[in-house]
Image (cartoon, rainbow, N blue to C red):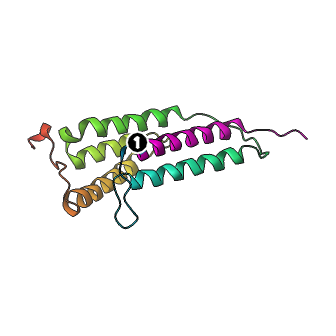
Amino acid sequence: MKTQINTGDFVSGAVFLGVGVLYALTTYQTLPMGEALSMGPGYFPSILSGVLAFLGIVMIARSFRTVQVLEFGEVPYRAIALITAAILIFANFLDELGLPLCVFVTTLVAFFGKREANPVRGVTIALGIAVFCTVVFSFGLRLPIPIVGTWFGGE
């Protein structure tokens, strides 16, 4: 009996395992661990590295099972491009636009990545998310993110 290997799962698992081991070694060599009740700066990254390595081992083990191959389908290039653009807009224009306007614009740009996007629904969702983020991050958590951007006379 010949075993088929799902190469996608195998390669993904190997990458996860490699990254997990690399970060675990780096953490152990450079950061103090501490203990469970008195955690050092290396404690949490080492836990995450272990989880990542474990997921890699699970994926490698799963790659040796015979699985049904599914059709990949059409690649949504529009969604990929607009979501990437939204991330770049948020990262580059947060200080210039301010939090509410920046969240509104990036949500709207990402929303139009959907092929059947309804503009009224998009504006409504973007407005709701912008208000929510402003209330939570600026007023609730008091993060030092400008509400009014420098392009509109803010600090």
Q: Residue at x 29, y 59 (%)?
A: 132
Task: Pick the residue in front: 117 or 73.
Answer: 73
- Is residue 19 found inside the magenta-colored segment of the image? yes
Q: Quadrant of the C terminus?
A: top left
Q: Is residue 145 above or below residue 132?
A: above
Left/right of residue 130 with respect to residue 9 in the rendered view: left
Q: Residue at x 57, y 38 (%)?
A: 15
Query: What is the three-letter code of the residue carrying label 1?
Result: Ala
Residue 147, image x, y percentages: 17, 50
Q: Quadrant of the N terminus?
A: top right
Dot 1 crowding, Cα within 10 Å, few <14, some 14–19, many 20+: many
Residue 58, image x, y percentages: 65, 50
Q: Residue at x 36, y 39 (%)?
A: 87
Q: Residue at x 36, y 58 (%)?
A: 34
**Which secondary structure is most common in the magenta stretch?**
helix
Left/right of residue 100 with respect to residue 20 in the rendered view: left
Q: Residue furthest right?
A: 1
Q: What number of labels is visible? A: 1
For the record, the magenta segment spans 1-28
- Is residue 44 found inside the magenta-colored segment of the image? no
Residue 115 visible in the picture: no
Task: Pick the residue in front: 88 or 60.
Answer: 60
Task: Pick the residue in front: 155 or 52.
Answer: 52
Residue 130 visible in the picture: yes
Label 1 belongs to which residue?
Answer: 110
* Secondary structure found at label 1: helix
